[in-house]
Image (cartoon, rainbow, N blue to C red):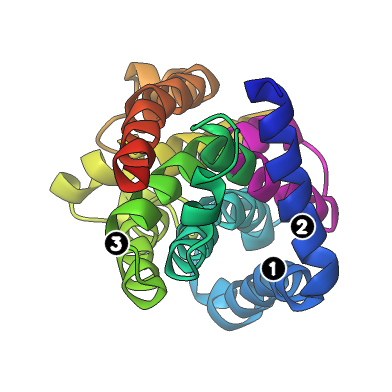
Amino acid sequence: MSAFQDTMVITQRQLRLLTRVPEVLIFSTIQPIMFVLLFRYVFGGSIDSGQPGGYVQLLMPGIFVQTVAFTLAGTAAGLAEDMKKGLIDRFRSLPISQSALVLGRTLGDSLLNIVVLAAMGITGLLVLLGFGYALSWVGIFVGLSAKDARVVQNVSFLVTFPLTFLSNAFAPTTGMPRALQYFAEWNPVSTMVAACRELFGLENQFGATAGSFPSENPLITSILYMFLIMAIFIPLSVRKYKNVSN
């Protein structure tokens, strides 16, 4: 079989797991809905969004991006669990491409995002899927490095939580300390959120970085971030997988 066919077989395996463990799909869908209700009705009244239509207009693009960013944790934990069960050793004994496992897992986890995002809306879907796919490669690298699923969960949240909460996803960055605004407005999550707001016809608010290339061109910057993340973590993940297999 070719590397492409091997990858498709692994992707099918990932999708079949959803039928055997439907709780993964159920809770993946419930989680973003829970965040919407929490931020909209608990915190929304105390945040001035500056958007026509109120805080919910500011919130929804951030929820979309947070949902696909959390793909990283699921990918990393799933791969670590497969390693713990000896699945990689089983694949080593088969005549398949060395990179098929990691490629198939990232594709399978990205397809899960389609179902979750479809439940929330489909505008900007392709851009969000691309961002989630890029971050899933970070999850592959973390999963192969940490190996234990409990450690992987902690490491994954150490990555995703600062990126999502130190961003423009849930509140305008203009109220943050100026030094923090540079990180908050230029991190990949913020540019992706800004790109979604632009696609949705909403206004973006920038503080310290107003007028810079990322603030003026958030969609282009987000695409550049995607390619940069994949350029770094795809070769690292494939090399790590080969080293683990050896």
Magenta stretch encompasses residue 17: no
Q: Which residue is mark 1?
A: 28
Of 177 and 222, the residue lying toward us: 222
What amino acid is labelled 1 in the image? Answer: Ser
Give coordinates of residue 200: x percent, y percent: 72, 35
Corner quadrant of residue 41: bottom right
Helix, strand or loop status at disc 1: helix
Residue 97 vertical placement versus 135 (above, below)? above
Residue 136 vertical placement versus 16 (above, below)? above
What amino acid is labelled 2 in the image? Answer: Val
Q: Which residue is mark 2?
A: 116
Label 3 Cα crowd, 10 Å radius (few <14 / some 14-19 / many 20+): some
Q: Residue at x 52, y 63 (%)?
A: 82
Q: Residue furthest bottom?
A: 42
Label 2 Cα crowd, 10 Å radius (few <14 / some 14-19 / many 20+): many
Q: Which residue is mark 3?
A: 146
Query: Disc 1 to disc 3, how far (Cα)?
Result: 23 Å
Helix, strand or loop status at disc 3: helix
Q: Residue at x 56, y 29 (%)?
A: 97
Of 59 and 28, the residue lying toward us: 28
Query: Disc 2 to disc 1, how far (Cα)?
Result: 7 Å
Give coordinates of residue 245: x percent, y percent: 37, 45
Q: Are marks 2 and 3 in contact (CB under 8 Å)?
A: no
Helix, strand or loop status at disc 2: helix
Question: Which range is magenta?
Answer: 106-131
Query: Quadrant where the N terminus lies?
Result: top right
Magenta stretch encompasses residue 127: yes
Corner quadrant of residue 49: bottom right
